[in-house]
Amino acid sequence: MVERKKMKRILFLLAATLLLGLSANAQTYVPTPENLQQRAEFQQHRLGIFLHWGIYATYAQGEWYLQNAGIDNTSYAVAAESFNPAKFDAAAWVRAFRDAGAGYITFTSRHHDGFSMFKTATSNYNIVDGTPFGRDIVGELAQACADEGLRFHLYYSTLDWLREDYPQGRTGLRTGRKGDRQDYDAYFDFMKTQVRELITQYPNLAALWFDGIWDHDQDPDFDWRMPTFYAYIHSLKPELLIGNNHHLLPFDGEDFQMFERDLPGENKAGLSGQEISALPLEMCQTMNGAWGYRISDTNYKSVKELVHLLVRAAAKNSNLLLNIGPMANGQLPPQSLDRLAGIGAWMRSHSTAVDGTTSTVIPEQPWGVTTQNAQDLFLHVLTPEALPMHNGLGKVVIPLPQDTRPARKGAVTLLSGEPLPYELSKDGFLTITLPAGSLEEIDTVIRIRR
């Protein structure tokens, strides 16, 4: 992932120039019917699990340790020789994600340090050939997802702090590379080889999640050839979804748009100021502060905060890709498992109001947000203290468009089915009374049958 402080240096004019340079290829990509079906399925499960795991977990200092520590890459690579996550259990991981209500995972097949977490013919710097563990972690996770019915996505870094043929950008300048053999033609062929391996070795691969274009944001003339790269990928597997964490409007050939650390339309972290496209949306966020495991980072968000983030994402027609940084021994941090269990407990009784829903025309209210599916409108009371109160009863007052108004008597209920008293004015203002004791700690969901 992108280091936040350095990403603030992205200049708008340079980004606009990069977009302009790519616009010549705009509107040439026509997704297949199978691809469109994959997009629809992608949006059916609003919660995904992001997994940042590599040999950097051995240092327990996050996924940017090679860059931040300024150590030589040969010294850093020694971690591969001791990477032996004996407690790794792909089936147990995926069951925990399924029980949390997640519909897919996105796993780091290769991060910026250049280490591949899958078997690759491009070098021995991979989990099978370069570690005492000797097992294909990507393959085991792919199989576990297939067994449990979860979609399987892979993250892939387009930048590399190790390879000499990668044209140096603004990061990875202290890792020991000589920089005298920069050759993007060779590096581009290397990436094509690796993505072909991922597509052919793991048949249930449903999406590729790219990251790293921002490494050349100060060099707007650098041509990543992404539309060509995407066309190659789609020639191998037309239905495969492609997204790229470049913090710009989607390029030609991309199938979904992502937002880092912010919901679409928000930019509190300074990484997601781009406009919102008509493609499927996904925002990614950490459970604590780091993407890769960092032993000192114990500032985990509460279950309530994470559920609210999920609900607000769905209300913006977006998925939430929630990150976990596994430990070097192969286990998920206990705090992560605790949050997964809490999210799962909520999802088991509330997922109807999140999964398979879309945004509505109703703006966010002081008390919460709204989602909808083909039959129902859902009001999510996230901040009950913002509700008007009368004789100890909460009053939800909201203007409703004609097609979202209650269709019959008894059409307004709690998600559990308990009818709620309501009044509908002639001008479409709906007033719902919430009885004492009906407010839930995390999210009180009101269902309106249309």
Image: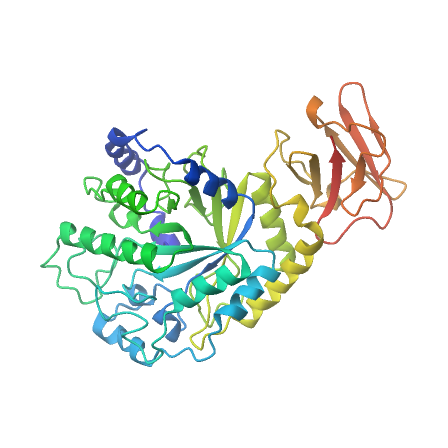
Count of number-bearing discs: 0
The residue lying toward the viewer, choosing from 220 and 145, is 145
Closest to the observer, 5 or 395? 395
Q: Nearer the viewer, residue 310 or 363?
A: 310
User: Percent position (x, y) of residue 134?
Assistant: 33, 77
Query: Which residue is depicted at the point 65% across and 62% down?
Result: 342
Q: Quadrant of the N terminus?
A: bottom left
Position of residue 226 in the picture relative to residue 411 (left or right): left
What residue is at 22 percent from the left and 42 percent from the top?
225
The residue sitting at 69% across, 24% down in the picture is 403
Relative height, residue 20 to residue 6 (above, below): above
Left or right, residue 191 beside residue 240:
left
Q: Position of residue 435 (x, y in %)?
A: 87, 44
Picture coordinates of residue 51, whole percent (x, y) = 45, 61
Q: Residue furthest top?
A: 426
The answer to whether 437 appears left or right of 4 in the picture is right
- When the figure is inspected, residue 394 is found, relative to residue 362, above or below; the finding is below
Kindly indicate the quadrant of the structure image that contains residue 11. Answer: top left
Residue 61 percent across, percent down from the top left: 39, 70
